[in-house]
């Protein structure tokens, strides 16, 4: 058991958590970031582009990584599971279990362990669209740039092969879990979200038809560091996806699934329609929607610009059924077209489901005074002092609002520490 002291603990190493940490540290406070995954960056690291400017997220993340790396006031732990939070404002204790990485700080990122590794498993970073080795790193921009060995996936003498391949004695298959207690004055919850499980939506065919994917999978398909090198192709046969359907509210605004609107799905699908249109000039995109929600002047302009493209068909109507033509692998989308006044059937190469954002804060063991509402978001009262929430912990928000909220959360955490110092 080791101990550590910090002014502020940030739980979650995505864009919200990193922004909170760097803002607080650059104001002179010590910060500890706890991330459950082997790498920082969260969901933003898996995106291809931001809306509405359609710029890649790598530049923003790279700046944040640099701010973390060279700021001595910031400590971070990956593969960190928060087991308990106790205490009160000014005097919290966070109990953490650190899972073993099986690669130590001698790692140079040479890739020898991956080349030697004989085991392949589904690649969760790419939403299962391809496979990775048991010894791996996510991308060329991963932070920390230190490989990790998924020991649960290892078989036989797998670990021995990785160890023998490493020239730097960086592979340690005997590495054990560690326990850590962190004392802090304030805590910021930045645990983010996960995509809703589209297999639960029976009528939309996800899990039965390979050419029905989610918006998260589409983001990885279009990414240069994704499974296809940025080529938007069908998972079933690698055919270019030139006719693509985007189905909105896949499980959202539905009492049987996610009762709330995830706020960003419409904009994400509009953005992804531009991926298709830019890559294949002769392509067509079909956008099936109940309502289109693009709050804010810049987002409304983004929508209007896409509407000007006559190859993007906007169809108001809830999709009733998605099926497959077994002869061609094409996806058949059936919808009640409100404006046309009848049912429509559209055959496409690829169908992209706009699944909602499901908060993950309920997976954390929280103090009893932090409440979770019926939709799974944390409810932080106005009079709550010491623990604060940011990003998708408390609302479904986009990247820009997450960053804005993170600055506010950093300020609140600093005020708590300052008042009780």
Image (cartoon, rainbow, N blue to C red):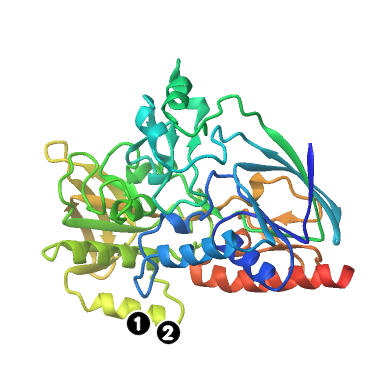
Give the x, y percent position of residue 240: 15, 51
Give the x, y percent position of residue 245: 25, 57
Q: Is residue 327 left or right of residue 10?
A: left
The residue located at (67%, 32%) in the rendering is: 177
Give the x, y percent position of residue 6: 77, 57
On-image quarter of the C terminus: bottom right
Q: Is residue 368 left or right of residue 168?
A: right
The residue located at (54%, 35%) in the rendering is: 103
At label 1, counting other C-alpha atoms closer than 10 Å, the crowd grade (few under 14, some 14-19, many 20 or more) is few
- Mark 2 → mark 1, Cα distance in angstroms: 6 Å
At label 2, counting other C-alpha atoms closer than 10 Å, the crowd grade (few under 14, some 14-19, many 20 or more) is few
The residue at which mark 2 appears reads as 297
Is residue 345 among what the camera can see?
yes
Camera-nearest residue between 196 and 95? 95
Camera-nearest residue between 391 and 173? 173
Secondary structure at badge 2 equals helix
Look at the numbered discs 2 and 1 and tell me whether their residues touch, using CB distance below 8 Å.
yes
The residue at which mark 1 appears reads as 301
Is residue 398 among what the camera can see?
no
């Amino acid at each position: 058991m080791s101990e550590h002291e910090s002014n502020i603990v940030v739980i979650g190493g995505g864009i919200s958590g990193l922004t909170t940490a760097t803002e607080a540290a650059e104001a002179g406070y010590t910060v500890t970031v706890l991330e459950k995954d082997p790498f920082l960056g969260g969901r933003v690291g898996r995106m291809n582009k931001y809306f509405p400017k359609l710029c890649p997220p790598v530049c923003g993340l790279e700046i944040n990584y640099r701010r973390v790396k060279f700021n001595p006031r910031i400590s971070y732990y990956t593969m960190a599971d928060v087991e308990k939070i106790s205490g009160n404002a000014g005097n919290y204790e966070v109990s953490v279990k650190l899972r073993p990485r099986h690669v130590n700080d001698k790692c140079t990122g040479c890739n020898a362990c991956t080349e030697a590794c004989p085991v392949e498993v589904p690649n969760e970073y790419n939403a299962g669209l391809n496979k990775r080795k048991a010894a791996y790193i996510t991308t060329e921009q991963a932070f920390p740039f230190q490989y990790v060995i998924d020991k649960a996936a290892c078989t036989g003498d797998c670990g021995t092969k990785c160890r023998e391949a490493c020239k730097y004695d960086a592979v340690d298959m005997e590495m054990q879990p560690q326990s850590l207690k962190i004392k802090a004055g304030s805590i910021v919850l930045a645990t983010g979200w996960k995509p809703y499980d589209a297999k639960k939506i029976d009528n939309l065919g996800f899990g039965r038809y390979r050419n029905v994917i989610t918006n998260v999978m589409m983001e990885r398909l279009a990414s240069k560091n994704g499974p296809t090198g940025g080529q938007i192709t069908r998972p079933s046969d690698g055919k270019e996806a030139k006719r693509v359907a985007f189905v909105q509210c896949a499980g959202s605004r539905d009492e049987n699934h996610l009762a709330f609107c995830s706020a960003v799905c419409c904009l994400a699908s509009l953005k992804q329609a531009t991926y298709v249109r830019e890559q294949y000039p002769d392509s067509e995109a079909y956008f099936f929607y109940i309502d289109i929600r693009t709050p804010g002047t810049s987002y409304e302009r983004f929508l209007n610009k896409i509407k000007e493209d006559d190859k993007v068909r906007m169809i108001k109507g809830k999709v009733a059924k998605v099926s497959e033509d077994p002869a061609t692998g094409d996806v058949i989308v059936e919808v009640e077209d409100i404006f046309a006044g009848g049912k429509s059937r559209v055959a496409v190469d690829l169908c992209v489901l706009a699944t909602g954002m499901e908060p993950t804060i309920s997976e954390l063991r929280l103090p009893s005074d932090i409440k979770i509402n019926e939709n799974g978001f944390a409810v932080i009262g106005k009079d709550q002092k010491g623990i604060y929430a940011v990003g998708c912990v408390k609302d479904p928000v986009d990247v820009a609002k997450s960053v804005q909220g993170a600055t506010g959360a950093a300020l609140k955490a600093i005020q708590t520490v300052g008042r009780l110092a």
